[in-house]
Every structure is written in C-alpha cells, then in structure tokens.
Image (cartoon, helix red, strand yellow):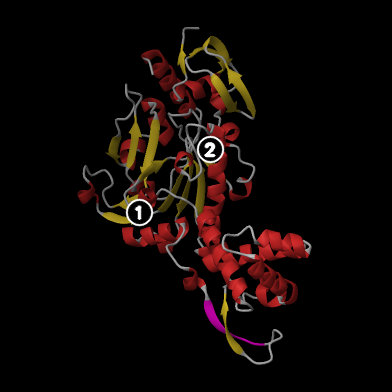
Amino acid sequence: MDERTREYLKGRFGDYYRRTDLSPPPVPNEREWGHIPWTAGGTRMVRHQSWLDVAGGGALEEFLAREKPRHVYFSAGRYQKPGAGSMSKKGWRAADLVFDLDADHLPGVDPEADSYAEMLAVCKDALLRLLDFLEHDFGFEELTVVFSGGRGYHVHVRDEGVLELGREQRREIVEYVNGPDIEFADLVRTETVDGMGLSNPVDKRMLPTDGGWGARVHRNLMSLFDELRELDDEAAVERLREFPRIGEGKATATLKQVRTNYEQLAAGNIDVHPAVVSIAKLVFEETVASEGAPIDEPVTTDINRLIRLPGSLHGGSGLAVTRIDREALEDFDPLSDAIPETFRGHDIRVNVTEGGPVTFDGDSFTVSPGEQSLPEALGVFLMCRGRAEKVRE
C-alpha cells in the first residue's frame, strides 16, 4: 500500500470515528486495549493500554478519531492492572469465553478458488452450528455475535459460569464443539425398554434424544428413516446401499424395521436389529464429520486474548466490526450490512491494480483494472484489500 492510499484511508477512518457512537464491552476499565496504526507494513501493535489511556480524557470515539487506527482491540481478559507492561504484572481476574471462525480456515474452503463472498457464506453456516452448540448443548445465554469485519465471525460468551475457566477447561469446550474424539459406543445408553410393543422389559441400546452429540446423531438417523418412508421399497433399499459396507441384506433388514418399528426407533432404540446399529454407526461418522464448528482453538483457550472492538473498522476491508442481533443473523449480509454509512453517497478516483470479480453491496460485478471513479465504499474496500490505490482527484 503506497503512502497516498494509506493517508487517505487513515483520514477517512478518522472521519468515521468522529461520526460514530461506540459501545465498550462490560467493565472496560478492567481490560487491556490495543490498536494498530496506519504505518508502513501495518502490523505494529500498540498495546498494554488501559481504559484511562484510551478514554480518560473523554469518549472512546475521541481517542479513535485522534489516532485514526487501522485496527482496534480489547482483551477478553479482565485484570487488576490492565495497563501494566507485562502479562505477569496485570493481575488476571477473569476472561470472556471467545470463539473465532475464520472463513479461510474452514474445511472445504479453498482461498485460491473461492471468492471472498463464498467463503463468508460458508463461515456463516459454521457460525450457526456453533451457536446451536453454545445455546442448546451448553445453555449459554449471555452471547454477543459479531462479524469480524474481515474473514469471519466472533462470539463472546459472558455467562458468569465461564469467566473463571482456565485454559484446559476452555480447551475441552473447543474439543466438544469441533467434533469430539469419541466412539459411537460412548454415545449409546443402555436402558430398560418397556411399553413399546415389547412383551417383556429388556435392556436395549438407546441413542439419546434429549441433547448433545447423541441427539444430533439420532436426529440425522430419523431424518434418513423419514426419507425412506417416503420411498418405495426398491428406491429405499438403493438409498441405504449408498452407505459404505451396506449390502442388500442389511438394507432390506433396516427398511423392514423402519416400516414396522418406527415408534421404537423414534424413541432412540437402535437394538431392534443389528442392521440398524450398522446404519446408526455410519450416520454417527457422518454427523461428527459434518456438524462440528471448526473454531480457531488458540483464540478460545487464550485467557489474555485481544479481540476486535465491535463498531470499529477493519483495516483489511474497510468494513465495520458489526454486532448482529440473534434474530437478524439469518438475513445478515456482511458485504452489505457492514458497509459504513460514512463511505456511502459519493465517488472517489482510484487506480484498480487487481481487477476481476467482486461481490459487494448486494451486487456481483467485474471491476476493470486502471484509473477510474468508483463509489467510495467500494474504493475503500478494494484499497484495504490491496486491489487498488488512491489517485489524485
């Protein structure tokens, strides 16, 4: 990035902060604050700042409008002396539980082949899976969902029960969410089954239906069985034979149980036939492989982590780090909803150094290389991503 581009972006980031009201996280005076200035290279972190350093003389927005930083951070950790120059002197008290999903680190994403918009769409799917774990498996209630402004999403958990968790306890949560290192047998319960058409009570292997990974496997198993019930016998057997190591015999036996013992299957009983157990094990493998949320482990286990400030700007995109209401998440479009209003409404001249496809502000189009006028929001986006440079107006 050349000096003219850097100075332009620095100035416009300052304009944004002068026009924006920011909400700090809870207990901001117990957190460390940091930022990265618009210097050549753009990687030097100014950190070990206290709330007094960044807002002591007024509002946080005044500090940011004056410094015009490229990136802004606060710590997940809460300290006795957050401005101390070393971690050992800060006096750790507690830490938010923070989750980070980066689009270019997700399984099945190819940063060389997939567009930025495509990667963010995959990342939102992973976010929804993560929230399902946090809300239903763990029962967390104090959740803040944030678009990072760059490659993905953050989730901040501030329930009282998590604040004093250590690194190892947080790592156990990561392992559970990512997809646990467990065997099928670990999920199965042995229960005495009665009153479901059986002549005598007997011990049967049951998949849980009340939550956790076991319930996820059972839900997917029943989804398969519901699909089979809609098919004729020949098509249903062929569907089951799509699974590895399932021949016609096991497929036919499973279908018979689906037709005659659906109520027991719905209750979690997989011991109705050995063939059903085989299918359940295969569905278990698929579920663990596909339904985990591949979060960035170091972010969650680091009790001193610095994380982006919601409402600040991301210097790698020019987009706002955006809080998202839970009910608005499904419809949230980061490449439209996170565009700062400060950058809307007028054009600027830039030299596009890397032309090509762009998805931005609800539209997909191709930008040609060379000097041209573009809407400022798009120009800022391209400059921040290293695809354009500012030219004289």
Residue 160 is a magenta residue: no
Q: Which residues are magenta?
A: 189-194
Relative depth, front residue between 120 and 299:
120
Image height check: is 198 above or below 116?
Answer: below
Residue 93 is situated, as x and y percent measured from the top left of the image, at 30, 57
Q: Position of residue 14 (x, y in %)?
A: 43, 24
Instruction: Assign a secondary structure to mark 1.
Output: helix
- Structural crowding at the residue carrying mark 2, measured as other residues with C-alpha within 10 Å and reported as few (<14), some (14–19) or many (≥20): many
Q: Secondary structure at mark 2?
A: helix
Residue drawn at (64%, 30%) of the image: 362
Cα–Cα span, label 1 and label 2: 25 Å
Q: Position of residue 244 (x, y in %)?
A: 57, 60
Residue 263 drawn above or below residue 66: below
Residue 141 appears in the picture as rendered: no
- Amino acid type for the residue under numbered disc 2: Met
Would residue 41 appear left or right of 217 to someone viewing this image?
Answer: left
- Dominant SS type (magenta): strand
Quarter of the N terminus within the rendering: top left
Crowdedness near tag 1: few (<14), some (14–19) or many (≥20) residues, C-alpha within 10 Å: many
Residue behind mark 1: 301
On the picture, is 300 further left or further right than 320?
Answer: left
Check disc 2 and report the residue beneath it.
Answer: 119
Res 274 visible: yes
Q: Which residue is found at the position 63% from the left and 46% from the top?
A: 330
Callout 1, which amino acid?
A: Thr
Say which of 391 and 144 sits in front: 391
